Image: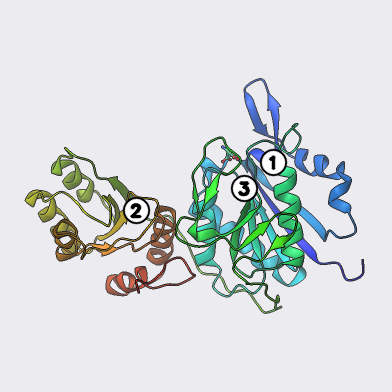
Amino acid sequence: MANKKRIYIAYTGGTIGMKPSQNGFVPVAGYLSETISNMPEFYHDDMPEFEIHEYEPLIDSADISPQAWQGLAEDIQQKYQDFDGFIILHGTDTMSYSASALSFIFESLSKPVIITGSQIPLSQLRSDARANLLNSLYIAAHYPINEVCIFFNNQLFRGNRTTKQHADGFSAFVSPNYPILLEAGIEIKNVAGKKQKTVNTRLTIGKIEKQSIAILHLFPGLDWQVLDNLLKSPLQALVLLTYGVGNAQQDPQLLNTLKEASERGILIVNCSQCLKGSVNMEGYATGHALSEVGVISGLDMTTETVIAKLHYLLSQDLAVNVIKELLTTDLRGELSKPA
Ligand code: ASP
């Protein structure tokens, strides 16, 4: 086929390229590239050309970090002009965090970036890796959507809307508050109607560094002193996982602790423990009390996106008030504004 698209594959690690060992699956340098080179379907006429770049060391995605996100973004920025699309091979455990973080770091994306991986290594019988990687390559070349996506189990998702829902099933990801972008059935269905042209502009990337952030999952019987101690540490932001539409217990000491922390400039973001739906602190008195003490609504963002957005925004040179404003602003399609 003339004018084949060229896709860059950044291989960071994860199950997809692992090899069985006496201690379970481990990533082994060279093993994934060798396995692919023995699979003729990757070289079919309708497939794009691709180049695999293996990172050193290959990691289990539990070890991913803001520093690694910055490195990945810089690598893709360097290769940006030479390729039509980018695939990142990544472990599933933290894939949604990385997809969210990269969506913020890439400030002017005009080519597709698809993150994928698998639950069973490519080299194993019954692996889901073959379909995930083949489809990701095919979609990046023929159905580009110029944003950071995750492809998994025949579905293409907006990356910063996903969360890992299944520890050992093939349907590892869901996008609870945003529709699927593409569905790979007998045909590739453009569910969101978003087929786009890739443009060869320059890619600008932002900076991301590790910030001091904590998550606290509310539960009946939470001792306010635990929260107080947490907020005394050198914390910049706290994500509160609240009940339902954003409610918390009406414990005056707990509310007072939150108020004092917010006044000291600590960002406190309200995310729901529910998978679907949006925070609305005006729904109940128990939620309203949180907005009164300075808690910021996480709206319908996933916890993964809020963590990535906080790392990103706190890495820029911005005043706390500006960060508060940006947290509830749609920067990369990561949130829906209430009607
Ligand atoms: N522990 C692995 C990882 O996230 C799991 C996977 O790849 O699916 O790297």
Q: How far across and how far down the image is residue 127, in percent? A: 71, 37
Which residue is farthest left?
A: 252
**Which residue is the site of mark 2?**
212
Point out the frontmost of discs 2 and 3: 3
Point out the frontmost of discs 1 and 3: 1
**Image quadrant for the N terminus?**
bottom right
Q: Could you tell me which residue is drawn at 42 percent across and 67 percent down?
A: 335
Q: How far across and how far down the image is residue 84, in percent? A: 75, 69
Compared across the picture, whether 92 is left or right of 266 comes to right
Compared across the picture, whether 132 is left or right of 38 comes to left
Residue 236 in sight in this render: no
- Look at label 3 and name its amino acid: His
Q: Give the spatial CA distance, label 2 vs label 1.
A: 36 Å
Q: Could you tell me which residue is drawn at 84 percent across and 50 percent down?
A: 42
Element at badge 1? Answer: loop
- Look at label 1 and name its amino acid: Asp
Which of the pair 180/224 is nearer the observer? 180
Which of the pair 154/134 is nearer the observer? 154
Mark 3: give few (<14), some (14-19) or many (20+) Cα within 10 Å.
many
**Which residue is the site of mark 1?**
128
Q: How far across and how far down the image is residue 63, in percent? A: 52, 42
Which mark identifies residue 90? 3
